[in-house]
Image: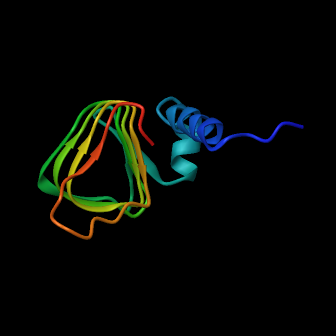
Amino acid sequence: MKKKSDYDRTQELRKEIEKLFKNTVLRNSLRIELKDGILWGKEVELGENVQVEKGAAILGKTKILKGKIEKSAIVIDCIIQEIEAKSKSMLFLVEQLDEEKVKAEKEQF
């Protein structure tokens, strides 16, 4: 049996998260809300200066003070002062420890 790469596992996770946009039962079981086309976890805190585009997913214990999260970007369990998450990027368990903006380019994990 071939072992899956980290990239393959990340792609599978992205597909599972995309199912949450259509599956109300699954969303409710995970306590995730779909509001204005955005997936929101119950423990997400965003500052007033955070822009989030439709199609983004912000999940887990995430706190972001300012920045932009583009469509299809996924942010999970992150503490970030300033973010720039491009479309189809994924941030997981990121904690910003300095003043430098956290950037995730398209399809970067």
**Farthest-out residue, left:** 49
Give me the residue at 26% from left, 70% from top. Answer: 97
Left or right of 109? Residue 26 is right
How is the protein colored in the picture? rainbow
Q: Residue 59's x, y, as percent?
A: 41, 52
For the question of whether residue 32 can be seen, the reply is yes
Residue 98 in the image, given as x and y percentages of width and height: 20, 68
Residue 2 at what x, y percent from top left? 84, 36
Name the image quarter holding the C terminus: top left
Looking at the picture, tell me which residue is in the foreground, 34 or 52.
52
Q: Nearer the viewer, residue 59 or 97?
A: 97
Left or right, 101 with respect to 16, comes to left
- How many marks on residues? 0
Examine the rendering and report whether any part of residue 23 can be seen.
no
Q: Quadrant of residue 76?
A: bottom left
The residue shown at (35%, 31%) is 106
Residue at the extreme right: 1
Where residue 37 appears, x then y in whole percent? 33, 32
Q: Quadrant of residue 55?
A: top left
Measured along the vertical axis of the image, is residue 108 above or below residue 102?
Answer: above
Kindly identify the residue that appears in the image at 17 percent across and 59 percent down: 100
* Image position of 82 with respect to 35: above or below: below
In the picture, the quarter occupied by the N terminus is top right
Quarter of the image for residue 57 reads top left
Residue situated furthest bottom in the rendering:
97
